[in-house]
Amino acid sequence: MCISEETVKRLELPLKPITELFEVFNTDGSQSGQKPITDYVDITLDTQGYQEQIKAVVTTLESADFFLGHDWLTYYNPEIDWNNGIIKFTRCPLSCKILHHNICIKSHIQRLQEPEIDEEEEKLPNLTSAEDLLDYMKEYTHLFNKINFNQLLACTQWDHEIKLTDNIPLELKAKIYPMTLKEEEELNTFIDENLKSGRIHISKSQYTAPCFFILKKDGLK
């Protein structure tokens, strides 16, 4: 079982050293290029009221907080409905303490198929390579590529709406900065691109947010 470094930091879980370091490999047997695993954490896994203590090694997980792993799935041998995201523990071993009454867990399934890319994205060069980055950034090369940047995780149950009270002011006093026609075109392009990728959503708020146009040192936007 694996847990991401970011999750360990966020939950402030105490690290415990592993006596013998081991390398990380991909499912095809190739080396992942990540640093060796050096630590693990003790965590409590709660499955519909049944709790078990497990050890999870700490590593870099690109798109998840936690991996249960093949050993756990083999031990409990659950029925998995991939279409509806439902897990049923109906085939547990005799030593299992999970109550056998068709426990169903609604799970968030992250699809692993290749995302659909429109013609404009296909034309974008994937310029960033490990050689372009500093040593400490090389393992995150995939995060610097535009196509990967447009791939977002699906919304989760923790996404929520911020509801304002009825007595909020109708307007906020702020200075209005005029925009040139070129800046307005750039702003509209930015909004369209980010709406399409899902990085932003149409807001119901009556307030607006200011924006500024500042050129980078290399002259790019």
Image (cartoon, rainbow, N blue to C red):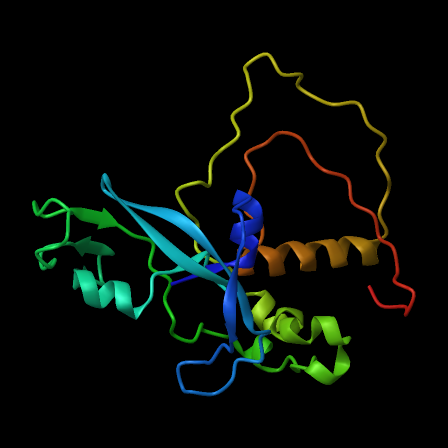
Vertical placement of 151 versus 208: above or below? Answer: below
Q: Which residue is drawn at 82% across and 58% down?
A: 182
- Side of 173 relative to 83 (left or right): right
Q: Is residue 181 above or below residue 126?
A: above
**In the image, residue 102 above or below residue 120:** above
Q: Is residue 111 among the parts visible in the rendering? A: yes
- Pinpoint residue 214: horizontal percent, then vertical percent: 87, 55
Quadrant location of the N terminus in the rendered image:
bottom left
Which of 46 and 171 lies nearest the eye of the viewer? 46
Q: Residue furthest top?
A: 167
On-image quarter of the C terminus? bottom right
Residue 12, horizontal then vertical, whole percent: 55, 44
Classify residue 79 by image quadrant.
bottom left
Left or right of 24 on screen, residue 52: left
Query: Can residue 60 be spotted in the picture?
Result: no
Residue 74 position, x and y percent, is 21, 68
Q: Which of 157 and 5 is in front in this view?
A: 5
User: Which of the 4 quarters of the picture holds residue 5?
Assistant: bottom right
Q: Between 31 and 176, which is closer to the camera in this rendering?
A: 31
In the rendered structure, the answer to whether residue 60 lies left or right of residue 77 reads: right
Up-down relation of residue 67 to residue 184 (above or below): below
Measuring 39% from the left and 57% from the top, which residue is drawn there? 55
User: Going 78% across and 75% down the picture, which residue do you hit?
Assistant: 134
Give the x, y percent position of residue 173.
Answer: 79, 23
For the point 12% across and 55% down, which residue is it? 95
Using the image as rendered, state which of residue 162 and residue 203 is in the foreground: 162
